[in-house]
Amino acid sequence: MERLEREPQSVMDDATFGCLQAGWEGAVGADADHLKAIGEIDRCLAAGFTSFTLDPGEHVRDVQGVVTDAQLLELPWAELEDDPASMARRYADLVVEVAGAPLPIPEEELRRAAAKYGAAIAYTVTMYRHLTTEAQYPIEVEVSVDETEEPTTLVEHVYMATEMKRLGMNWVSFAPRYIGGFEKGVDYIGDTTLFFESLSGHAQIAQALGPYKISLHSGSDKFSIYELAASATGRLVHLKTSGTSYLTALEIAARFEPSLFREIYDLSREAYRGARASYQVSAQLDRTPDSREVPDDRLGSLVTAADSRQILHVGYGAVLTLEDSQGVRRISDSLRTALGSHVAEYEAALETHIGRHLAPFADTRA
Ligand SMILES: [Zn+2]
């Protein structure tokens, strides 16, 4: 919403009319993703969002090595309604089974978990209490720390879930920071066997302490892990995609409006230097061709090749908000017009692409 300078209400209105237009008559729900401040919660509640992803990532600390008593005492114990001795006692007897055996929770690792996530828990609980006090209709809560530096270990997951429960929270879904790379627009980067093992551990903790869903963020285009994720979680999983229909829109532009597509591509490449800093991305500009080197009938390959696809993906903010001197968003308008002229092709492409994301998670039992 921020990158497109949009308000929750107008996003909700557009999505609602989109559903009507498409003839959808079932229930709908909207996810207010990565909320970091109380004010954002209020605006999304006012617009009727039903799912709230609380993101305390700014309060997660980078903790390495042994945590000293002094470091531990710095935690917001009053807000956590706790003290170091009670915490240690609570985990001494806690048994959570992972892979058929109790997960060891050494005190040193517990202290590290508290030092890393304690302040984040306190902040999450503050957001949660505000949200549940203000909400006038049923809502669901997800907690996400996926946009942080260090992977969430199994012990850290146990710590977070145990503390959130103790402080009275109910949530339906949790997004740890996984091992490996979840980058925009491209497949999972890393060892899929290790990912499966780690995801299975997280899913078993979620079963034992919930049950709640395990959430995969930046989950679009991760085709190499969907089957693994479905089986590791028993399909108790929340897959979040991002920019999925935008990239499909660009596929249509590449096919039918080559000059518009070239403009979008050039702008995205220009904007990439800036966009790089705020995303987990590894695309390299020098591995992407200049648009003038690519003939019209090959433009589609820029939407599929990993580097250019990622650059196009994270360029959406720069592209869609670009205004001329009259304040007209010409590229955004032209793209919309192009999609309007090729509705059938756009819908078919979306169905194929989104379908590839859904199929591995489908319940195939009769
Ligand atoms: Zn996320």
Image: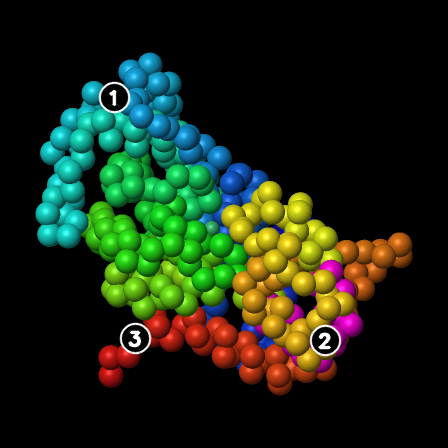
Q: Which comes before the other along the chain, label 1 or label 2?
A: 1
Relative depth, front residue between 302 and 362: 302
Q: Residues within 10 Å of mark 2 (few under 14, many from 20)?
A: few
Amino acid at circle 1: Pro
Label 1: which residue? Answer: 84
The part of the chain drawn in magenta is: 247-266
Which is more toward the observer, 252 or 203? Answer: 252
Q: Which type of secondary structure does the marked residue at label 1 adopt?
A: helix
Q: The residue under label 3 is which amino acid type?
A: Asp
Give me the residue at 51% from left, 45% from top. 35
- The location of residue 62, given as percent across then percent down, is 41, 30
Location of mark 3 (residue) = 363
Nearer to me, 65 or 165:
65
Horizontal side of residue 267 vs 98, given as left or right: right
What's the amino acid at mark 2?
Pro
Residue at screen point 61% across, 72% down:
301
Residue 306 appears in view: yes
Instruction: Provide the residue designation for mark 2.
Output: 295
- Choose the circle earlier in sequence order: 2 or 3: 2
- Left or right, 291 with respect to 83, comes to right
The rendered magenta stretch, by its main secondary structure, is classed as: helix
Q: Is residue 337 rendered magenta in the image?
A: no
How far apart in space, not on screen, are marks 1 and 3 (Cα)? 45 Å
Distance of label 2 from label 3 (alpha carbons): 43 Å
- Going from the N terminus, do you reach mark 1 or mark 3 first? 1
Q: Residues within 10 Å of mark 1 (few under 14, many from 20)?
A: some
Marks 2, 3: nearer the viewer: 2
Q: Position of residue 358 (x, y in %)?
A: 41, 72
- Magenta residue check for 263: yes
